[in-house]
Amino acid sequence: MYLLGYDIGSSSVKACLVEAASGKIIASDFYPKEEMKITAVKPGWAEQEPEEWWDNLKNAHQSIMSKSGIKGEDIKAIGITWQMHGLVLVDKDQKVLRPSIIWCDSRAVPYGEKAFNAIGHEKCLSHLLNSPGNFTASKLAWVKEHEPEIFQKIDKLMLPGDYIAMKLSGDAVMTIEGLSEGMFWDFKNKCLSEDVLNYYGIPKSFFPEIKPIFGLQGEVSATAAKELGLKQGTPITYRAGDQPNNALSLNVFNPGEIASTAGTSGVVYGVLDQLDYDKKSRVNTFAHVNYTEEQTRLGVLLCINGTGILNSWLRRNLALDGLSYGDMNNLAAQSSIGANGVSIIPFGNGAERVLENKEVNCSIHGINFNVHNKSDLLRAAQEGIVFSYEYGMEIMKEMGMNIHLIRAGYANMFLSPLFAQTLASVSGATIELFNTDGAAGAAKGAGMGVGIYASNDEAFGSLEKLSVVEPELDKTSQYRDAYQRWKELIK
């Protein structure tokens, strides 16, 4: 008995087969092998063709089925995760009306700002838990103004994962999690946001039927079954955006638990059990995968743009081309806590939401030419990234989150023992590192949705924990002193 997960990213589409009983990954693959094309007709725009996602899914799917030798009828459920905040529009024949405006497209920023002011800051934050910002609703407002002929043809709007589910089943449906990431969900009234719909002039008819995050959302159609070699009627039983799904993949379901990633950019995603928001909208709050109208479970998302990109920049520009990232980690570890007084502000990859959308750029402070060397710079860079995480987590703590456990995949910056140890010690949280990914998480989410697993703990009990990093309590003051020195530099 097997479970199938799909991860619809902006770089590639991944497919993964998981054996339900053992939780082991049987086969996984992704397509294309080079990054998917993102079209930018104008500066700040970013679009992709939804049909290309479907084509790449078919390629990845056929690869894992061929590798594993598993038959379609052995797959008991399907789960889907996707790049958040994208806009997909289809007509009455389920034909895509225009390319998807994806998450990193910034054209809708002015629309979100106007809506925030018109609806009212307090009302937006208390009902949506965010400003309308550059999210899906604001992207649709741009289409309405600039492409009215497209707007008139819209039958349904969807997020990227909803589109893939529609291609699989023939049915267009959404979840509350998806509605919340698009700024369509009113958390206080527990319904579609009348304020957003009325302000933007969005008909309720655009929205598909709402289905639970876990449970029967549709069944593989005869057409899709033929294309993929699946059994007609195979249930689709889970879907969620990539960051809530990453948390699910790491078994982060409960208040105070944190999931983190640290690739080119970095994310800290924590679970909250009460309606709350940051008054300055420096972090975003969405429905978590186990949110229901009866149980408040929210995902508070902190995004730092300048994370691994800082490490790679230093590698290119400090004459470190001959060193691997592992070598760089070892070199950084030769410096002491606090990098001998050097501090690096890592915000050099555009505007940072955690700094109220200011673009402060990266800066290096405290260098003495007679004292400091590459080791100090490399350590200061890793510490600066960690300190930006802590700065954001302090906002999350102000919202009532008790952060005591951080779970992460053993990848990217978390491959550095120094990085993980610094994060544990400055935050006071235990860090657990696992071998998992989003597509595997989506597959297990499908297992929960179809009832194979009775709980999340059963579904993720087989997670391979690679290491645990505890705070260095005897050195807490050294880490906190370095953080406070860093923090003074961004005031």
Image (cartoon, grey):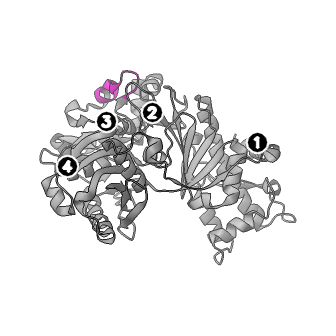
Circle 4 residues within 10 Å: few <14, some 14–19, many ≥20: many
Task: State which mark lies toward you, 2 or 3.
Answer: 3
Q: Earlier in the sequence, mark 1 or mark 4?
A: 4
Residue 195 lies in the magenta stretch: yes
Q: Residue at x 18, y 50 (%)?
A: 233
- SS class of the residue under badge 2? loop
The disc labelled 4 sits on which kind of residue? Answer: Ser
* Label at residue 212: 3
Residue 298: x, y in percent?
A: 47, 33
CA separation, marks 2 and 1?
29 Å
The disc labelled 1 sits on which kind of residue? Answer: Gln
CA separation, marks 2 and 4?
33 Å
Q: Which residues are magenta?
A: 186-198
Q: Earlier in the sequence, mark 2 or mark 1?
A: 2
CA separation, marks 3 and 1?
44 Å
Q: Which residue is mark 1?
A: 484
Residue 465: x, y in percent?
A: 57, 54
Classify 294 as above or below 480: above
- Is residue 280 visible to us here? yes
* Label at residue 172: none
Q: Which residue is mark 4?
A: 169
Circle 2 residues within 10 Å: few <14, some 14–19, many ≥20: many
In contact (CB < 8 Å): disc 2 and disc 3: no
Circle 1 residues within 10 Å: few <14, some 14–19, many ≥20: few
The disc labelled 3 sits on which kind of residue? Answer: Pro
Q: Nearer the viewer, residue 67 or 406?
A: 67
- SS class of the residue under badge 1? helix
Q: Nearer the viewer, residue 352 or 148?
A: 352
Residue 324 lies in the magenta stretch: no
Q: Which residue is mark 2?
A: 131
